[in-house]
Amino acid sequence: MAAPDTAPDDTAPETAEVPGGRIARIGALLLGVVAAVLLLSWGTLRLLDRWDVRPASSPLARQTLEAPEPRLQTDEAADLARLRAAEDAELHRLAWVDRKAGLARIPIEDAMDLLARDGWP
């Protein structure tokens, strides 16, 4: 009598099935763990919200510090306009430079008229 052929048949379908109940239990367990972690995190955050656990701020944190000179220019056009306005104000006003010595500043238009009329001293 010849021995039956026990070699696996590559064309036969697999008969091993994955148990659906076991997969459902593992999925439910994973969902339960995720839900428990979310609830625990939510509860911890609510508890910490009730307590004021933030440290008191330092007086230095509330103080605004300005950088020392020279500072970087952030708006060159505005800086130049302010400089020109300050220069124009100096050129067009009458003021004492040294009252005791009798030195006065006169507007530039008046100075040009005096030079044109009297010449250079």
Image (cartoon, rainbow, N blue to C red):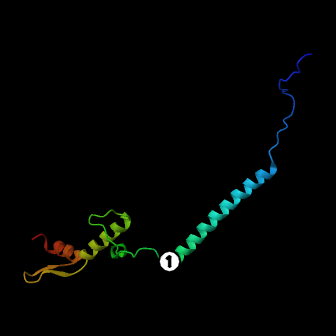
Q: Looking at the image, which residue sits at the far bottom?
A: 100
x then y, percent, for residue 37: 62, 63
In the visual, does 79 lie left or right of 95? right
Q: Position of residue 2 (x, y in %)?
A: 90, 16
Residue to which mark 1 is pinned: 51
| Left or right placement of residue 20 versus residue 31 in this view | right
Query: Residue at 7% of width from left, 83% of height from top?
Result: 100
Give residue 24's quadrant in the image: bottom right
User: Which quadrant would residue 60 be assigned to in this image?
Assistant: bottom left
Q: Residues within 10 Å of mark 1 (few under 14, many from 20)?
A: few
Q: Quadrant of residue 33?
A: bottom right
Give the amino acid type for the residue marked by disc 1 in the picture.
Trp
Left or right of 55? Residue 65 is: left
Considering every residue shown, the one lying at the far top of the view is 1
Q: Compared to 99, does 83 lie above or below?
A: above
The C terminus: image quadrant: bottom left
Question: Going 63% across and 65% down the picture, which residue do you hit?
Answer: 38
Closer to the camera in the image, 61 or 48: 48
Place of residue 63 in the rendered image (x, y in percent of width and height, measured from the top left): 34, 75
